[in-house]
Amino acid sequence: MLTKGNNNTANILLLSLVSLFLLTSLSCLITDNKKIYSPQIPAIEATATYKIAIGGVASGRNELVIFDEYNNILNLRGRALSFEVEGEDVVELVPRDGYQDFASGSGALIRPKKPGYAVIKYLIDGTRQEDEFLVIVPPQSIIQMMVAEAARQITDEADVDENNHVRLTSRSNTAEAIGFVARNRVKITYENDDLSLFDVDSNLWKSDPPASYFDAVIYAHNEDIYQYSPVDPSDPTHGIFEDAATRDGLDESFHRAYDQAVLTAADIFSESIDDPTGGAFAFFSPTEEEWSCILDLYTQQGTNIPPSCGFTDSDFPSLAPIELFVPRDIWRYKDGMPSFVFARQKGNSEGPVVIIE
């Protein structure tokens, strides 16, 4: 919750359609020079896209394996397999576990070094092949925040296969919504050139953009007031936030949420999905009293948000007037109360509450 105030080896043939869709979206992104708060990923027709994390991924998710036209692993023993990497500062390639070299393993293990993107090409016996692979490494802080804030919701929403592994195509509405709040804070801070809006630390902000932009808004605090509750050492979810720095650091019960968060964080970092919140810059988990207040305000078409509803204009004076927003597909409790309510600048709606039924 935000505080108030200023095994699965990726089969390159099966993934090609997903990758083409992703890169089509990204090709639109890179034509807008104003969006330099996200990585400038080139518009390539990637054979496969790998979404991996500094903190590790599920077994096989970081293995680049080369298949033939019949969807069988290509036998390259006795031949020379080498790779070219655009983005060597982001990833490094090593032989897959159990193999002495690239050729005997018909591929490589992708090890992330820092957030960003990389494009990988390979050569067989010195001849470059047509396939190109895109690797996206989102800031680990986005993953940590999602898991700490909404592990239960993300676990419920993740789409898993028959082996209980999160599918590469899985999406979580709740993870996307809370993740985009961080992205929107980056966007608002960048476009207004004002670090004070969300108490962002200047040194962290400019340390390694664009990844450091996300770290800066997530770790932001003013003395003992933290913009994201899980970052606060005194918060009950802080331990989960810290543990999610690595997948292995988490209890196994959190692995599904973590694996989904990796996919969602990569999509948000690369801006390959749309913002479901319409520009929201804050969220909170409502109490029953706050939700009752919000519903009353919504049904009675009130004009001002009282403090009993959660956020008010006074919490975000530089961004006021605000409206409270509930996306259609956000995770809800059995009684219908949403797990999160979002705050965004008021649009053309009549009242200060927008609920998408």
Image: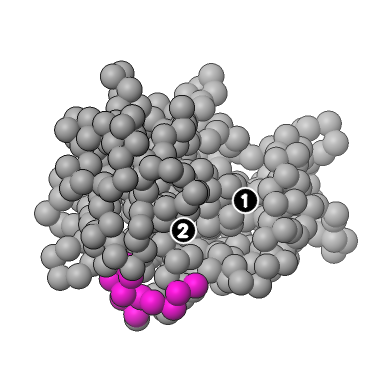
The image quadrant that residue 84 belongs to is bottom right
**Residue 119, image x, y percentages:** 69, 61
Q: Secondary structure at mark 1?
A: loop
Magenta segment includes 196: yes
- Amino acid type at circle 1 is Ser
Q: Secondary structure at mark 2?
A: helix
Q: Is residue 90 at least partly visible in the picture? A: no
* Residue of label 1: 272
Up-down: is 305 above or below 41?
Answer: above
**Residue 54, image x, y percentages:** 45, 57
- Amino acid type at circle 2 is Arg
Q: Is residue 293 at least partly visible in the picture? A: yes
- Towards the viewer: 79 or 56: 56
**Residue 226, image x, y percentages:** 21, 61
Q: Which mark is residue 328?
A: none
Up-down: is 225 above or below 162?
Answer: below
Colouring convention used in this rendered image of the protein? one colour
Q: Are marks 2 and 1 in contact (CB under 8 Å)?
A: no
For marks 2 and 1, give the CA distance. Answer: 12 Å
- Towards the viewer: 328 or 145: 328
| Span colored in magenta | 191-202
Q: Would you say 87 lies left or right of 236 here? A: right
Say which label, 2 or 1, has the lower sequence index: 2
Q: Which mark is residue 183?
A: 2
| Residue at the image position 35 percent from the left and 75 percent from the top | 195
| Residue at the image position 31 percent from the left and 45 percent from the top | 303
Q: Would you say 353 lies left or right of 311 here? A: right
Circle 1 Cα neighbour tier, 10 Å, few/some/many (<14 / 14–19 / ≥20): some
| Residue at the image position 34 percent from the left and 80 percent from the top | 202
- Towards the viewer: 69 or 86: 86
**Residue 253, image x, y percentages:** 31, 31
